[in-house]
Image (spheres, helix red, strand yellow):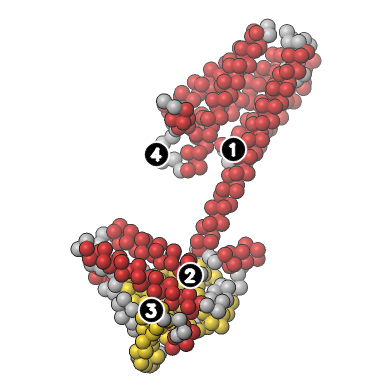
């Protein structure tokens, strides 16, 4: 077994299938941290024994033994609370007892500093609010050592040079461990902050997210010209009835993930999905002059993707997902809705007309309004369909996008 496998085996001690990521990390970290402490206890015990402090040597050796037994018990029982408490109690009490046996803080080479790792460990492995109890316990032990000092032996078997060496080792080791704990806290804080940022940016545009963080709210904004695109699948309900819920969600997830990639490539903003309908827009939250061209370009890419997907499903003997795409350009109002599970959304007649473009189109075609056509006619070959009646909108000029000029 190589070192990496051994490390994985040791860090998995006490883990259960129901552990969440944070608990799994706490368990593995406490086990991994306990092992160097066991090794240090054995080394300290041997050194004290070599220097003539046989009785004092028993204390770090006892720590190593009890800590090892605690790990073994945890491996069999999976009782993390018991394991956590025993480890923190051992590192709190035994350095204190060792200091008393050596004659005090100076003659004990400041070994009680190891006890400070107990409240720091409590912050790491308990809730931070529970750590103050362990800090109070540490302060009480320091106070007891101060009161008991006159009754402790003034001299032990260690030479002044050996005491200085132990001072150096104790202070350096404890300082290094404190640094690593603080470093871990900072890394953990940055990790969760970055993950929160990512989650927020998956919900809101970056500019809106920054405004929300800075001001606690985001103002609704009016945009004079935005291009809105809707997509929808023909006979989706009938196809969905033939699929299991898992198959349906998997299929939609794969398709919409591809749509997400396409619109990101063309600087569009995803607004939402409603069932099998996908809605996005160009020209917001940052206004631009190419939003109509960007949106039509994205629509062509989406049509190409769906065409490939139709061929694949047809080859597999499955019903194809035929898509209608509608696009319209005009003014909208955009902003955040609600206080919980909020979402960035857009409103206005432009949205309604874009939806009508989709419902008035044909499978496999990109149907655009006259206002969008005027902005893209120099780049794309379009076929005028004439004035088509749209629900609640009367007759509207519509065009099919055929491709690039």
Mark 3 lies on residue: 403
Above or below, 351 against 209 in this view is below
The x and y percentages for residue 299 are 40, 74
Do tag 1 and tag 4 residues touch (Cβ < 8 Å)? no
| Mark-to-mark CA distance, 1 and 4 | 22 Å
- Name the residue located 54 percent from the left edge and 70 percent from the top edge: 336
Residue 224 relative to residue 277: left or right: right
* Mark 3 residue element: strand
Do tag 4 and tag 2 residues touch (Cβ < 8 Å)? no
Q: Nearer the viewer, mark 1 or mark 3?
A: 3
Above or below, 307 against 225 in this view is above
- Name the residue located 62 percent from the left edge and 36 percent from the top edge: 181
Mark closest to the chain's N terminus, 3 or 2: 2
Residue 229 relative to residue 97: left or right: left
Mark 2 lies on residue: 266
Mark closest to the chain's N terminus, 1 or 3: 1
Question: What label sits on residue 17 in the rendered view?
Answer: 4
Q: Quadrant of residue 142?
A: top right
| Mark-to-mark CA distance, 1 and 2 | 44 Å
* Mark 2 residue element: loop
| Mark-to-mark CA distance, 3 and 2 | 16 Å
Q: Nearer the viewer, mark 3 or mark 4?
A: 3
* Mark 4 residue element: loop
Q: Quadrant of residue 390?
A: bottom left
Mark closest to the chain's N terminus, 1 or 4: 4
């Amino acid at each position: 077994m190589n070192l990496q496998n051994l490390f994985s085996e040791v860090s998995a001690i006490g883990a259960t299938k129901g552990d969440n990521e944070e608990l799994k990390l706490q368990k593995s970290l406490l086990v991994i941290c306990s092992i160097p402490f066991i090794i240090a206890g054995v080394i300290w015990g041997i050194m004290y024994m070599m220097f003539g402090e046989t009785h004092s040597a028993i204390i770090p050796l006892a720590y190593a033994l009890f800590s090892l037994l605690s790990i073994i018990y945890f491996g069999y029982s999976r009782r993390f609370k018991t394991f956590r408490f025993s480890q923190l109690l051992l590192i709190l009490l035994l350095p204190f007892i060792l200091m008393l046996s050596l004659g005090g803080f100076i003659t004990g080479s400041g070994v009680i500093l190891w006890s400070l790792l107990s409240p720091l460990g409590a912050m790491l492995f308990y809730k931070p609010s529970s750590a103050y109890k362990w800090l109070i316990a540490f302060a009480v032990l320091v106070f007891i050592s101060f009161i008991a000092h006159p009754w402790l032996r003034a001299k032990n078997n260690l030479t002044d040079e050996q005491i200085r060496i132990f001072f150096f080792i104790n202070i350096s080791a404890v300082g290094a461990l404190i640094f690593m704990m603080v470093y871990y806290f900072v890394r953990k804080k940055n990790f969760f902050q970055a993950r929160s940022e990512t989650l927020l940016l998956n919900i809101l545009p970056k500019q809106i997210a920054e405004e929300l963080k800075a001001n606690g709210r985001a103002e609704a904004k009016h945009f004079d010209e935005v291009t809105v695109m809707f997509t929808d699948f023909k006979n989706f309900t009938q196809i969905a009835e033939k699929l299991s819920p898992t198959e349906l969600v998997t299929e939609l997830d794969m398709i919409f993930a591809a749509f997400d990639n396409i619109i990101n490539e063309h600087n569009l903003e995803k607004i939402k999905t409603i069932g099998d309908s996908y809605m996005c827009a160009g020209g917001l939250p940052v206004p631009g002059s190419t939003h109509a061209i960007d949106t039509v370009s994205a629509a062509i890419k989406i049509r190409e993707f769906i065409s490939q997907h139709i061929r694949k499903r047809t080859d597999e003997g499955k019903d194809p997902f035929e898509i209608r795409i509608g696009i319209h350009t005009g003014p909208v109002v955009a902003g955040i809705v609600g206080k919980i599970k909020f979402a960035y959304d857009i409103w206005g007649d432009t949205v309604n007309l874009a939806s009508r473009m989709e419902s008035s189109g044909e499978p496999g075609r990109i149907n655009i309004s006259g206002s969008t056509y005027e902005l893209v006619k120099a780049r794309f070959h379009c076929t005028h369909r004439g004035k088509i009646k749209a629900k609640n909108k009367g007759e509207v000029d519509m065009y099919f996008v055929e491709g690039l000029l």
